[in-house]
Image (spheres, rainbow, N blue to C red):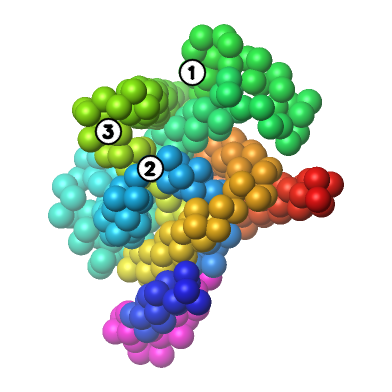
């Protein structure tokens, strides 16, 4: 309870708010809204375990001050920004409707809002897919990576990292291949959004790596700004994960408030899980856990690409991610026993 006490309190408050929302909309639907929020929360936690692992790997390199900011400022951005405001902004951009009007649709005409959000799916999923695929390659192409879980795949990938811009070329090739299956009117949106995902990751990762190197050399500028860049990087990663969750949640309910409650409460539990992983040095003890998380990210990237063609149920996404995480967990435990 030390780590999950506050998240549990937020869960209770969130469920109470979901019940109130249901009763205020239609008398007698409070428990249905409460149940929807609970299911969305559970799905968010199950599909975001890999997000928690990635957060933990990045937080280990951050100063105590920026860790605290990520867990305070970051949770506010994650809950209200990425899971409520960000989808509204996305709908506004793709549908060319003012944000105020989109907000009214979200609160008072959820069916119309859901329609606009799904119409923006190609752009959303193309951006999220390329960003997450670049994140996947960032881990497996790392020249300093000496531990391999699925050796016959990870060792060749590490060697491919010697090829300059391999990650960009491979991700862009996947984006181009995707266009074969899209109608002509969707291609431009997909390509522009996908390229934006590649460029966003390249810019933030490049800046983060540059400042990390300068910080090791005790550069005053780097020491001052490295934490900020890493913070932005983590928020962008969280945004990419939340995009899939927001779209999937509409399969359970069209009420944007209930969706925001479920995803927001889930985000609190993911942050709590991140703290556990960092403070307990879990990633050092379970050496393949990060590998499983990044394989799950690669799978999610492919699923997001696939969802531009045909909707993929959130349960399938969660099941694939959890299978990879659990498999890496078992491998880590067996590895520890082998060395004991």
The residue under label 3 is 223
In the drawing, does residue 139 fall left or right of residue 325?
left
**Label placed on residue 305:** none
The answer to whether residue 317 is visible is: no
Which sits in the foreground, 5 or 239?
5
Asked if residue 244 lies in the magenta stretch, the reply is no
**How far is mark 2 from mark 3, CA to CA?**
10 Å
- Residue 309 picture location, percent across and down: 55, 37
Q: Residue at x 66, y 54 (%)?
A: 322
Earlier in the chain: of badge 1 and badge 3, it is 1
Q: Which of marks 1 and 3 is in front?
A: 3
- Residue 173 picture location, percent across and down: 55, 17
**How far is mark 1 from mark 3, CA to CA?**
28 Å
Earlier in the chain: of badge 2 and badge 3, it is 2
The residue under label 2 is 62
In the picture, residue 258 is in which quadrant?
bottom left
Above or below, 336 against 208 in this view is: below
Q: Nearer the viewer, mark 2 or mark 1?
A: 2
Earlier in the chain: of badge 2 and badge 1, it is 2
- Residue 74 picture location, percent across and down: 31, 53
The residue under label 1 is 168
Helix, strand or loop status at disc 3: helix
Q: Which residue is drawn at 52% across and 60% down?
A: 276
In the picture, residue 101 is in which quadrant?
bottom left
């Amino acid at each position: 309870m030390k780590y999950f006490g506050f998240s549990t309190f937020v869960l209770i408050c969130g469920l109470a708010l979901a019940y109130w929302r249901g009763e205020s909309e239609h008398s007698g639907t409070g428990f249905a809204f409460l149940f929807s929020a609970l299911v969305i929360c559970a799905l968010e936690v199950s599909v975001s375990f890999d997000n928690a692992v990635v957060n933990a790997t990045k937080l280990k390199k951050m100063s105590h001050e920026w860790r605290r900011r990520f867990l305070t400022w970051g949770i506010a951005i994650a809950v209200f920004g990425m899971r409520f405001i960000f989808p509204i902004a996305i709908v506004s951009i793709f549908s060319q409707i003012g944000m105020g009007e989109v907000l009214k649709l979200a609160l008072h005409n959820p069916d119309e809002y859901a329609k606009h959000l799904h119409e923006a799916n190609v752009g959303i999923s193309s951006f999220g897919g390329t960003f997450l695929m670049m994140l996947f390659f960032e881990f497996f192409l790392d020249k300093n990576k000496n531990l391999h879980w699925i050796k016959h795949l990870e060792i060749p990938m590490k060697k491919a990292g010697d090829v300059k811009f391999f990650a960009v070329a491979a991700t862009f090739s996947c984006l181009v291949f995707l266009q074969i299956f899209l109608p002509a009117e969707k291609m431009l949106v997909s390509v522009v959004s996908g390229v934006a995902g590649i460029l966003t990751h390249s810019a933030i990762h490049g800046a983060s790596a540059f400042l990390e190197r300068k910080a090791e050399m005790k550069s005053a500028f780097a020491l001052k700004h490295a934490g900020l860049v890493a913070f932005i990087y983590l928020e962008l990663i969280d945004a990419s994960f939340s995009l899939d969750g927001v779209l999937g949640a509409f399969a359970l309910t069209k009420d944007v408030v209930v969706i925001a409650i479920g995803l927001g409460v889930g985000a609190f539990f993911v942050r709590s899980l991140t703290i556990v992983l960092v403070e307990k040095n879990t990633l050092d003890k379970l050496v393949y856990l990060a590998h499983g998380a990044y394989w799950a990210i690669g799978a999610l990237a492919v699923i997001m690409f696939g969802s531009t063609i045909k909707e993929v149920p959130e349960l399938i996404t969660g099941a694939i991610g959890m299978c990879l995480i659990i498999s890496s967990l078992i491998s880590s435990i067996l590895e520890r026993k082998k060395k004991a």
